[in-house]
Image: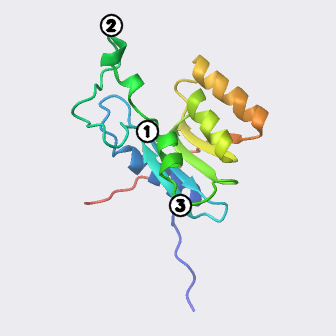
Amino acid sequence: MGGKRSGYLSWDEYFMGVAMLSGMRSKDPNTQVGCCIVSPDNRILSMGYNGFPSGCSDDDFPWDREGEDPLKIKYFYSTHSELNAILNYKGTSLTGATMYVTLFPCNECAKAIIQCGIREVIYDSDKYAGMPSVVASKRMMEAAGVKYRQYERTGRELKIRL
């Protein structure tokens, strides 16, 4: 009887890989963020990426990050990957779930994460760590008992031919 193969993906590699792949669906020219929500028994419950709400054309709404007219920049229109993943979930409860996300959640997403019962957030990048929205996010998650930790990159390179 042979043993199992070695070199298979860890759960963290697998789910962060799914989050990264989800982020590749984003049409945002500046920032592509992906998210994967997982049950306590390692089942994918939902995924999301940053973009506009259903019915809001990617061609009719602005992707610009800056401008004098706030109605001509993306921030009033785009939905973050975390909120999309939460809203895409069709089950009854996300209580006890873990969220894998490629960028640390902002304060608005943290509110949704806390309210729906997600208990842990595993993130890749924390490039906005000093920004008030992320500082507030961490403060709320700590107060609510939501654990968070940075994904430890393994350096493994995966190639997928599509």
Q: Nearer the viewer, residue 160 or 104?
A: 104
Q: Are marks 3 and 2 in contact (CB under 8 Å)?
A: no
N-terminal of the two: label 3 or label 1?
A: 1
User: Is the C-beta separation of discs 3 and 1 under 8 Å?
Assistant: no
Quarter of the image that includes the C terminus: bottom left
- Residue 96, visible in the rendered structure: yes
Residue pointed to by mark 1: 33
Quadrant for the N terminus, please: bottom right
Q: Nearer the viewer, residue 112 or 106?
A: 112
Instruction: Mark 1 vs mark 2: give the one in front.
Output: 2
What residue type is disc 3 on? Ile
Name the kind of residue labelled 1 in the image: Val
Q: Is residue 112 above or below residue 62?
A: below
Q: CA distance from mark 3 to mark 1?
A: 17 Å
Q: How is the image coloured?
A: rainbow
Whether tag 1 and tag 2 are in contact, CB under 8 A, the answer is no
Residue 49, given in percent of the width and then of the height, sits at: 42, 43
Q: Residues within 10 Å of mark 3 (few under 14, many from 20)?
A: some
Q: Residue at point 41% right, 52% down?
A: 157
Callout 3 secondary element: strand
Q: Which label number is shown at residue 79?
A: none
Element type at mark 1: loop
Provide the residue designation for mark 3: 44
Residue at numbered disc 2: 68
Q: Percent position (x, y) of residue 125?
A: 52, 34
C-alpha distance separating marks 1 and 2: 25 Å
Q: Depth check: 22 or 68 in front?
A: 68
| Occupied quadrant, residue 96 | bottom right
Of the pair 162 and 99, the residue shown nearer to us: 99
